[in-house]
Image (tube, rainbow, N blue to C red):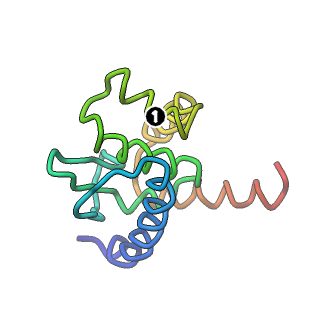
Amino acid sequence: MTKHYVMHKETARAVIQAKLLYWNQFYNLQYNRVSIRNQRRCWGSCTSLGNLNFSYKILFLPEHLQDYIIVHELCHLAELNHGQQFWNLVAQQIPDYQTHIRELRAIELGGMSYVRLEKLKDVQKQSVVEGI
């Protein structure tokens, strides 16, 4: 357990819980436990028992990617695979999900360390402020 994880875990939980409530109003799916973890390679996962797991590091992603990850894991509650029915569910709320996947993969290629992700978040905030 890292100091950074401990420092941001509950903030991540609050953001994720709020997004789950918002996005699940469109799906009305049942889930059990929501865990916030310090995962190295994975942004989120869903178990066959209906438990949702998320990396606290999604806190440092742009909001549209946070939303995509939440929707992706919610849809796994209905379809525990990446078949066409699953992607149809995702597309109901995130029609441009393929663009989001490409963005996440590009971020992952550079590494998922919290130092790098915080820098990306700072760059994103600056772009918004400057109107870029």
**For this rendering, which residue is in front, 41 or 28?**
28
The quadrant the N terminus occupies is: bottom left
Residue 76, image x, y percentages:
30, 40
Q: Quadrant of residue 5?
A: bottom left
Residue at position x 33%, y 56% in the image: 54
Extreme residue in the left direction: 49
Q: Residue furthest right?
A: 131
Disc 1 element: helix
Tell how many labels: 1
The furthest residue to the front: 28
Residue ID for mark 1: 105
Badge 1 crowding class, 10 Å Cα cut-off, few under 14, some 14 to 19, many 20 or more, is: few
- When asked about the image quadrant of residue 35, the answer is bottom left
Compared across the picture, whether 92 is left or right of 44 comes to right
User: Tag 1: residue type?
Assistant: Arg
- Name the residue nearer the viewer: 87 or 123: 87
Q: Residue drawn 44% across and 46% down?
A: 71
Q: Nearer the viewer, residue 38 or 109?
A: 38
Q: Position of residue 67 (x, y in %)?
A: 52, 50
Q: Is residue 61 above or below residue 17?
A: above
Q: Is residue 40 above or below residue 105?
A: below
Q: Residue at x 52, y 28 (%)?
A: 98
Please report the residue visible at 77 percent of the width from the left and 57 percent of the height from the top: 128
- Residue 75 placed where, x, y %? 36, 41
Residue 47 percent location from the top left of the image: 19, 47
